[in-house]
Image (cartoon, rainbow, N blue to C red):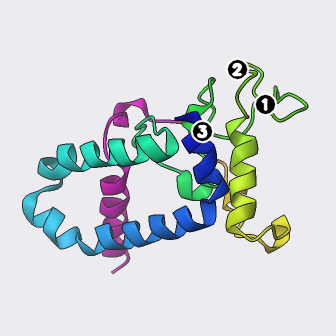
Amino acid sequence: MYSVRKWTVSHAKSFNSVYKILENTLSALHPVWKLIGYERVEKPVAFVEKHVKGLLFDCQMCGQCVLHETGMSCPMNCPKTLRNGPCGGVRANGNCEVKPEMRCVWVEAWRGDQIINDNQSIAGSRESILNVQIAVDHSLKGRSSWLKEVREKHLKVKDEV
């Protein structure tokens, strides 16, 4: 899985585009999800999400996906599960201090973000890599982050109206 994970970061721009299309498609299906019931579709959608994202990103199913903000590198693959940035223990070669054979997921996140932004300077980028990520809510582990995002997006739109 590690080699696939590195490959997806190397192709972060394409995967980010696919991710946006999937997000828009799932969002367009909100009336269907609402009609069936989000709780009823949770398990089948989470099953698909786990296998697709597990294969491509070594997804840990935290239920709060931030791949689109971290250069398509899942921060939950950090041995310390640090979601809000690198720990400061990154080795000189960019590898993890805990697992020396593994690249730091945050070094990979930065690389993926640069690929998505065509290697622009940070001033010219979308700067999502600079967003501080909130701590993980462990009660969401195993749940679909795709459905969570769709549901929250539509609740926000409803609240704004």
Residue 154 on the magenta segment: yes
**As shown in the figure, which amino acid type bears the numbered disc 1?**
Asn
Query: Which image quadrant is residue 34 in?
Result: bottom left
Of badges 1 and 3, nearer the viewer stands 3
Q: Check residue 99 in the rendering and tell me which mark sits there, or answer none.
A: 2
Whether residue 36 sits left or right of residue 86 in the image: it is left
Contact flag, marks 2 and 3 (Cβ < 8 Å): no
Residue reaching furthest bottom? Answer: 161
**Sequence order check, earlier mark of 1 and 3:** 3
Q: 27 above or below 77?
A: below
Closer-to-camera residue (160/129): 129
Spatial CA span between label 1 and label 3:
14 Å
**As shown in the figure, which amino acid type bears the numbered disc 2?**
Lys
Circle 1 packing at 10 Å, graded few (<14), some (14-19), many (20+), is some
Spatial CA span between label 2 and label 1:
8 Å
Write down the residue under mark 1: 95
Of badges 2 and 3, nearer the viewer stands 3
Residue numbers of the magenta segment: 136-161
Q: Quadrant of the C terminus?
A: bottom left
Contact flag, marks 1 and 3 (Cβ < 8 Å): no
Q: Residue at x 80, y 67 (%)?
A: 119
Q: Position of residue 74 (x, y in %)?
A: 56, 43
Q: Check residue 3 in the rendering and tell me which mark sits there, or answer none.
A: 3
Contact flag, marks 2 and 1 (Cβ < 8 Å): yes
Q: 80 above or below 63?
A: above
Q: Residue at x 74, y 36 (%)?
A: 86
Name the secondary structure under disc 2: loop
Closer-to-camera residue (62/19): 19
